[in-house]
Amino acid sequence: MSDTQVIRCHACGANNRVDPRKIAQGNEAVCAGCKTPLPVSNKPVIVTDATFAAEVEGSLVPVLLDLWAPWCGPCRMIAPVLEELAAEMAGRVRIAKLNVDENQAAAARFNVRSIPTLLILKAGIEVDRLVGVLPKHELTRRLEQALAKGASA
């Protein structure tokens, strides 16, 4: 039961306990009170400059933001790893992808100079930065560190 996450419903404000393992199995999380889908995804979320505030700054869980471009070979190499992490860490971490060619404001805001750049954000504030292609175990380790910092604060 300690793995459950509490997610607040945007529609009615109710707090809901969600088991990330059930989300990873493909189940949809819905509010127990009003049955509105909860903001938990087992797939990376596409973010734009226009949706950045709602999807990243408004996230109730830390966000791993992938700043990428379609022409970038290393960006395409890391994409399957991010898909796996999105499924494995659903409900604990949100994986988001932002195309820097189409969304330059967010890239400029975080002073991104090379891609892929992965930012770990809490409430829109950068807590860690990873540049380049890293192995899955290293990404997982850094995400777990970020989660542990939040639990002790």
Image (cartoon, rainbow, N blue to C red):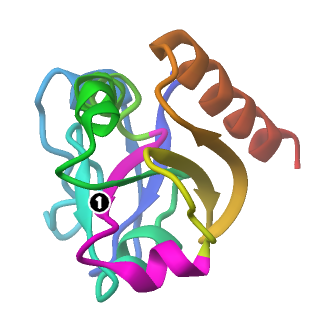
The residue nearer to you, when weighing 146 against 107, is: 107
Above or below, comparing residue 40 to residue 102 in the picture: above
Q: Residues within 10 Å of mark 1 (few under 14, many from 20)?
A: some
Q: Give me the residue at 34% from left, 83% from top.
A: 49
**Left or right: 93 with respect to 145?**
left
The image quadrant that residue 37 belongs to is bottom left
The residue nearer to you, when weighing 125 against 9, is: 125
In the rendered structure, which amino acid carries the disc numbered 1? Pro
The part of the chain drawn in magenta is: 92-109
- Outermost residue to the right: 153
The residue nearer to you, when weighing 9 against 145, is: 145
The residue where tag 1 is placed is 39
Above or below, comparing residue 25 to residue 122 in the picture: above
Q: Give me the residue at 57% from left, 61% from top.
A: 113
Q: Give me the residue at 51% from left, 48% from top.
A: 117
Horizontal and vertical percent for residue 82? 33, 31
| Residue 105 counted in the magenta span | yes
Horizontal and vertical percent for residue 83? 24, 30
**Can residue 32 be seen from the camera position used here?**
no
| Residue 85 counted in the magenta span | no
Horizontal and vertical percent for residue 22? 24, 25
Q: Give me the residue at 31% from left, 34% from top.
A: 86
